Image (cartoon, grey):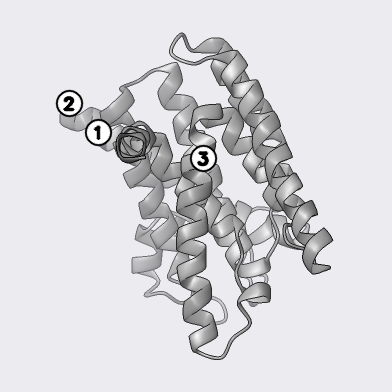
Amino acid sequence: MIIAVYILVALFGLSLGSFLNVVIYRLPKGYSIVSPRSFCPNCRRQLPWYENIPVFSYIFLKGRCRGCGAKISIQYPLIELIGALTAIGVFAVYDISIDAFFVFLFLMALIAVTLIDWRYRIIPDQISLPFILLGIGWSLLSPARSPSSAALGALLGGGGLFLIGYLYKLIRHVDGMGGGDVKLMAMIGAFLGVRMLLPVILIASLTGSVYGIYLMRKGGDAKSMVAFGSFLAPAAAICLFFGEQFLRYYFARF
């Protein structure tokens, strides 16, 4: 019985992963995520249902469009599989509950933000702004969450990052933080609460700095090439599950 439940959860995750691919492709381009139905990005041919089955259609089509023969990005089945694994992981931790629902949505939003910001250097308001409200809404519905911590997390998360960016621009006379990063941090604060702001910033800053140093060693411009949202979002996912352990370790040594 439990195996059947996990299969259903995985299928649900695959389906949401397929939808996430639509979000990642269409939102940065200003397309509707509702219509038209899925199409080939190369020849614009609309896909019949049997060419749009998560993972299996990619294997059946051998990674190429049936109409024009263009190569289908490996991103599509990978995101679908990540959706399935995310659903299974959330179910294993939270079972079927209100917490599982919000955690899964949050993680899927973080995946979308990571890939969109990495590729296009933007974080769509259509993701961050509604999810600020969702995070606060979760705190109102779950007895394990604190509405005051969620609201303060959103306020200090977004406001703190805005202040850092403002001071950086004041001192260096160049933009140090985009508006998308500020709204993303408000969204993260709403979901994780005020206690997790410091771990998220520390982890994202550390990993972003390491990547920036790597770019500079290769002759690149780290200031213009590092998409900070792509480091904030994974840091938030890490802190969702391991943030309390991080805080206990950190304060035990300082």
User: Residue lying furthest top in this view?
Assistant: 143
Amino acid carrying label 3: it is Leu
Q: Is residue 71 left or right of residue 90?
A: right
Q: Which residue is at a point 49% across and 34% down the rendered structure image?
A: 196
Nearer-N-terminus badge (3/1): 1
Mark 1–mark 2 Cα distance, whole angstroms, equals 6 Å
Disc 2 element: helix
Instruction: Determine which residue is flagged by label 2.
Output: 2
Nearer-N-terminus badge (3/2): 2
Q: Which mark is residue 6?
A: 1
* Residue 236 x %, y %: 48, 43
Marks 3 and 1 close (CB-CB < 8 Å): no
* Residue 29 x %, y %: 75, 62
Amino acid carrying label 2: it is Ile
Instruction: Determine which residue is flagged by label 3.
Output: 198
Vertical position of residue 98 compared to residue 108: above or below: above
Q: How many marks?
A: 3
Amino acid carrying label 1: it is Tyr
